[in-house]
Image (cartoon, coloured by chain):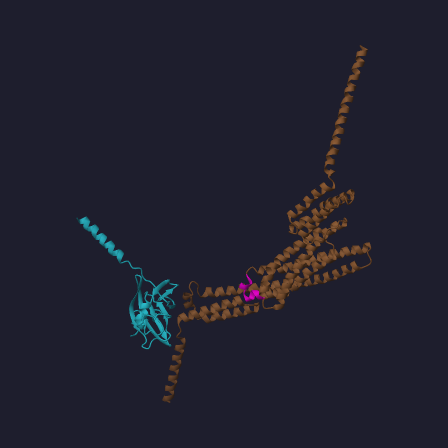
Amino acid sequence: MKSKAFFLSLIILGTSACSSIVLQPADYSWPIENVLKVDDFGFVSETRYTFKINVKNLYTEEFKDSTAFMGKELRIIRDAKGYYYATGNNFKNVYVLMTQENGMKIENIIPVSQAGLKSPVMNQKNSSIELIDNGLKTNFTNKGIEGK
Amino acid sequence: MSFTILKNTLILVLFLGFVSVINAQSDYEKTQSFKNKYASLEQKIKDAKSLEEVDALVIDITSFKTDFIANKPLLDKTLYPDNFTSAIEKLENAVELRKGDFTQIVDLQTEVGTLKTALTELNDQNTSLLGQIKDLQFSQKKDQSTINSLNRLVASLKANIKERDELVKGIVDSLLQEFTTSPSSLNEAEKTAIFKKVETGNLFYNVERTIGDNIQFMKVTTLTADDLSDMKEQYKEFSKTWRQIGPKLSQIYLDQANRARQIAGIDDLFRQWNFRINNEIWSSINQAFREKNITLMNFKNGDDFTESVTTFIDDEVKNLGVKRAEESKETFYTFTDSVWFQQVKPNWVPILLENNLLSEAQKDSIESRFVQWKEKVDPGGFTSYWLYIAVVLAVIILALIAIMVIRRNKKTEPKIVSQEND
């Protein structure tokens, strides 16, 4: 009886140990943002980091218009933690995204301009992402604008 | 006072703000700017038309490197799979390679320049030799020394023409190597190099001269079968190369009407040269018959030649009985033995067959006519040989029988003597 209990506890310990293995630290950051053209079906595809994703819902969310994606460019950058930041011309927000099975989930929406961004660019900084629009810089992480 | 300080501070703040806006640049844009300038430099290297242009590009690359060195850490990450250093190295290597191309072109130009001088000298010498040969041919003086000088001049001219032809062919061959790709895919620099080579080598003039002199040479001299065979071979090689290069040069000189005309003129000259060689071959064959008082209808190709020979044989057969039999036989043996089998067949038929001027079938057709002709002209000619052999054999057999009879008689004589003694 004692030996059975011993083996059972070993199995439980072993299983719990396997499920908690985490590979750390990791750096997912892209050195620069990518400017991706949205195709007629709402997809953007990235060749260096090789992914393809449909962004129609992002444009619908931003512009409340299901056809707003057409002919647009989406700027995407990824930080060290693995969060993606997406924005573009006339966007009022920066979208923080995280991969999930077969897609990306919006983790946070960071409001950055009430009038809409004119010509935004994003740069990778040490611990944050820098957004520049019309000479104005804003730094943020996945949690929101820094210093706010 | 305090107002002035306030004003200066405001200006400073505004200036710093402006500088900050200026410096606020996208890393993406910086990378794109580097890539665009890089691509532009790469294209300029490819399109450079001279060594000077390439040298200027070396300075541009140095300045490009200096402009972007501050962004090296960023570019090292973003130029995947390259980095800043390897990208610059690629440009520097490309510029060095392009320099090599132009150095080679300069070397080739020097080589072509040397050839040009040699060609000019040979062209001048040939003109002078052709003139001297013509003078001697028209001269009333036909003594041995004149004939010897004429032969010497012809030999010099022949050697000179051959040497000059080789030089011109060398230029054409080297051009052909440049045309390994289609002219439409040649870039401007490659086209310029070809223009320079063509113009520096005075190619069109020299090709015209080569063909012209060969035609003139045929006019002023009597050529043997070997000479004409060599010349035909030379024509074939040269015209094959020209057929490859001519259309490509036409494409390159598409917008220069005079050059296009000159190229078409050269095509025509090649046709004349070939026609002249063929003519000379047929004339020499006709001459071989004429020298033996056999007159054939004029012929300038294999069909005419076959027809001419056939007609001659038919006429001879028809004239049997009109002419004396001995005369007909003499014509037959002269035609076949002295001309056809002794001169035409060994010397000229191989050239005719090799150059498709006469087909095997035509040759066989002519020779089969000889058999029919012989049967008519000298029907006993063949059987008489057997008769002679039979007679000789009969004589030998009779002689053997006689010897045997004599020996037998000699053996029986002593036997009778011995019986008498007993």
| Residue for point 38% across, 64% down | A46
Q: Is-magenta flag for residue B349?
A: no
Q: Which residue is nearer to you in this view: B266 or B287?
A: B287
**Residue B135 picture location, percent across and down:** 78, 60
**Residue B138 picture location, percent across and down:** 79, 59
Q: Main secondary structure of the magenta part?
A: helix
Q: Which residue is nearer to you in this view: B339 or B37?
A: B339
**Residue B160 picture location, percent across and down:** 71, 58
- Say whether residue A103 is visible: yes
Q: Which residue is nearer to you in this view: A111 or B313?
A: B313
Q: What letter labels the chain drawn in cyan?
A: A
Q: Colour of chain B?
A: brown
Residue extending furthest toward the top: B422
Callout count: 0
Instruction: Tell me the quarter of the picture where residue B385 sits.
Output: top right
Boundaries of the magenta span: B182-192
Q: Is-magenta flag for residue B188?
A: yes
| Residue for point 63% across, 68% down | B258
Residue extending furthest toward the left: A1
**Residue B143 picture location, percent across and down:** 82, 55
| Residue for point 73% across, 62% down | B127
Residue extending furthest toward the bottom: B1
Quadrant in which the N terminus of chain B is drawn: bottom left
